[in-house]
Amino acid sequence: MTRSQADIDASSAPLIEHLIELRKRLIWCIVGFMLAFLLCFFFAKPIFNFLIVPYQVATAWAGIDPDSVELIYTAPQEFFFTQVKIAAFGGLFLAFPIIATQIYKFVAPGLYRDERGAFLPFLIATPILFLLGAALVYFFFTPMVMWFFLSMQQSGNVEGQAAIQLLPRVSEYLSLIMTLIFSFGLVFQLPVVTTLLVRVGITSADGLVAKRKYAIVLAFIAAAILTPPDPMSQIGLALPTILLYELSIITARMIEKKRAASVAEAEVRQDG
């Protein structure tokens, strides 16, 4: 075997090991998701009833008996596929700790000890911030949006006025609430993203401050794209986004102060 051939074989060995490790981690992720999917599909109806609670709260705000809430499906297969979507969303949520762990185990061997220590907080913060965004949607934002839509109903008691009643389809209601949950969940990742950018030196606290006006405009543009086409939904998403951007600036300043203190300490040790 020639020297060049030996070098090629030696360089390909780590690649094969990485591919084997990647395959192993992907299998764990897929198995974890499938088990979570099956579990959520078994409990799809109770989960959907749980997701209907914000709508019932909205009906109470609108002066309607919450027990009279009705949702419909207009195609024989609609509710079945709605349950499949619930299982997929729920399975992804339940399997996230497994998926995140497998990602960390795949990446960690290539990181230094201090880099691994810096990586872990982001894995913890990501689901927590997502849950905070989802909780805001569930307990406040969805009831507010549904109350707004319910306020457009017409009773038909007035002469010359037709009776117009809201009867949401199960698929459309699920699509609405899951769109809101994922939109808010993603927006609440803003501090994680900006903190990562500051850590690697791509941006800084001063840079975030300088781009604040553009961030505000982008917040409203993103809200217009991600939320239903009503002003309440768009403002409701844009305002938390702006507040999270301000939180990101504060976090960036803390990171920079900590970094400066570490550099100063290292210089003192070197001089000593």
Image (cartoon, rainbow, N blue to C red):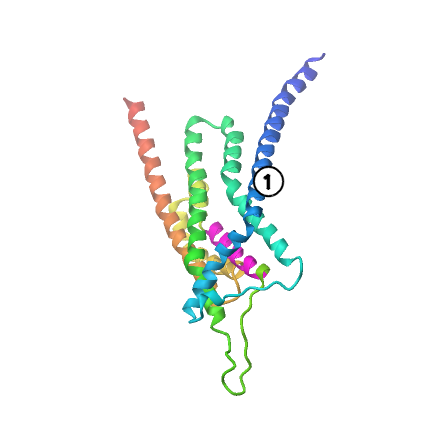
Relative to 203, say whether 161 is above or below: below
Dominant secondary-structure state across the stretch colored magenta = helix
Q: Which residue is drawn at 35% across and 40% down?
A: 256
Residue drawn at x 63%, y 21% is: 13
Q: Which residue lies furthest to the front in this view?
A: 67
Where's residue 258, x and y in %? 33, 37
State the quadrant of the C terminus: top left
Relative image position of residue 234 (x, y in whole percent): 47, 63
Q: Is residue 137 magenta?
A: no
Q: Mark 1 points at which residue?
A: 34
Picture coordinates of residue 264, whole percent (x, y): 31, 31
The quarter of the image holding the N terminus is: top right
Query: Which residue occupies the foreground of this view, 207 or 106?
Result: 106
The answer to whether 95 appears left or right of 195 in the picture is right
Q: Farthest right residue?
A: 1
- Residue 202's spot in the image, x, y percent? 46, 41
Q: In this view, does 95 lie above or below 47?
A: above
Task: Let me know if residue 202 appears in the view.
Answer: yes
**In the rendered image, is residue 217 in sight?**
no
Please tell me which residue is depicted at 44% across the width and 60% down the height of the picture: 141
Q: For this rendering, which residue is in front, 154 or 29? A: 154
For mark 1, give the secondary structure: helix
Task: Name the residue located 53 percent from the left edge and 40 percent from the top edge.
Answer: 95
Give the total number of marks visible in the rendering.
1
- In the image, the segment drawn in magenta is 172-187
The crowd level at tag 1 (other Cα within 10 Å; few <14, some 14-19, many 20+) is: some
Q: What residue type is labelled 1?
A: Met
Outermost residue on the top side: it is 1
